[in-house]
Image: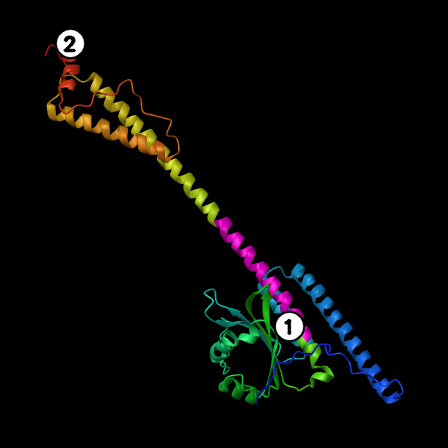
Amino acid sequence: METDLVVCDSHEASSPAVDARDVDALRAALTRETLERRRAEAMAKIQTNVVKYAVDLLAREPDVDGFFRALLKTLAEEGESHKVTVWLIDEDQKGCDVWMAHIDGEVFTASSAEWKTTEFPRQTFGRHLFSYEPGWHQTVEYGADDERMPANVRDFVRREGLSETLVAPLLISDKTLGWLTLCSRETRDCSEGQWWRIALIEAIARQAALALHHSRVVEQQRVEERRKAILEERNRLARDIHDNLAQGFAAILMQLQGAQREACVLPASVARSIETAVDLARTHLTEARRSVGAPGRRAPRASRPPRSGSTGGARRRRAPCGRRCGR
């Protein structure tokens, strides 16, 4: 049986013209207008009360998990419903799954052991929610035999004795974060009172989406702050390590240059090794200082030995020392 989307709201079409001489028609028109006005006032009151309740609840339950537990409990009680469920879209935007549910007075999460043994075809219904385009931007009402729902979901609904399911999107601006579903066992005609249940789930869905979005923004800020703190600590440690290395290379360079000045005539191989060690120490000292962001500091230049392809310079510097030693 094909079922159209039901949104029980105030009648948008203008009332037909009424013969002023027809008392019964006038009485019926007055009754309709009174009912519409009362419905509009009731819907406004529902929205106001839900906003006030959500603000008070956020003050009591700043944690998003506690907030939703209390919110689902309230929706189930006020909506006279058997089951209320929150479905959230995956981070990769490729599907959705149950995040939290309130069933017959108990709250379950996706990690609860009960979800692994439940007969409810959650994956099938999740794929339907994600693929059914009208449900992304407006509330949808399903009957027990609604052909829009998958066959195995309809079978489960009939076994459980559920009469109707309301699905309201969790909208922030034009972005859908997921869905809020409400299942009830009794059947109510829309004209008699079903509109208030739709108004209730839509009002709560707006507050739930706002709280969920705010929680995600806060969590992203916390993650970013932790990332910055970790990065700053790593940079500090790196600067300390490179500064210690720079001091070590500077000390090694001073010792090597002191050895060059004080040593007497050295074998060619030893002189080349010392010359190479000096160059390596000077190079790594420069790199270490550059790493800690102090390129202006340089190694001492007064004792910089001449760079040549042979050890002649070193031997010439050592000659006076050799003569003083009597060699």
Do residues under tags 2 and 1 come within 8 Å of each other at their CB atoms? no
Looking at the picture, how far across and down is residue 39, in whole percent?
76, 76
What's the magenta bit mostly, secondary-structure-wise? helix
Residue drawn where x is 63% and y is 61% of the image: 61
Magenta includes 68?
A: no
| Amino acid at dot 2 | Arg
Q: Nearer the viewer, residue 175 or 257?
A: 175
Q: Quadrant of the N terminus?
A: bottom right
Measured as percent of width and height from the top left, residue 267 is found at: 11, 22
Where residue 315 appears, as percent x and y from the top left, is: 14, 17
Measure the C-alpha gap from mark 2 to mark 1: 99 Å
State the mark number for residue 324. 2
Q: Callout 1, which amino acid?
A: Lys
Q: Quadrant of the C terminus?
A: top left
- Disc assigned to residue 299: none
Q: Which residues are magenta?
A: 199-226
Give the quarter of the image for residue 279. Answer: top left
Is 230 left, or right, of 78 in this rendering? left
Q: Is residue 203 magenta?
A: yes
Secondary structure of residue under mark 2 = helix
Precedes in sequence: disc 2 or disc 1: 1
From the viewer's perspective, is residue 83 above or below residue 25? Answer: above
- At mark 1, the secondary structure is helix
Q: Quadrant of residue 210?
A: bottom right
* Looking at the image, residue 233 lies above or below residue 66: above
Nearer to us in this view, 240 or 305: 305
Which x, y percent locates residue 289? 35, 31
Q: Judge left or right: residue 26 versus residue 66.
A: right
For label 1, count other residues whose C-alpha is less than 10 Å away and answer few (under 14), some (14-19) or many (20+). Answer: many
Residue at image x 30%, y 26%?
Answer: 251
Q: Kindly identify which numbered label has been placed on residue 73.
A: 1
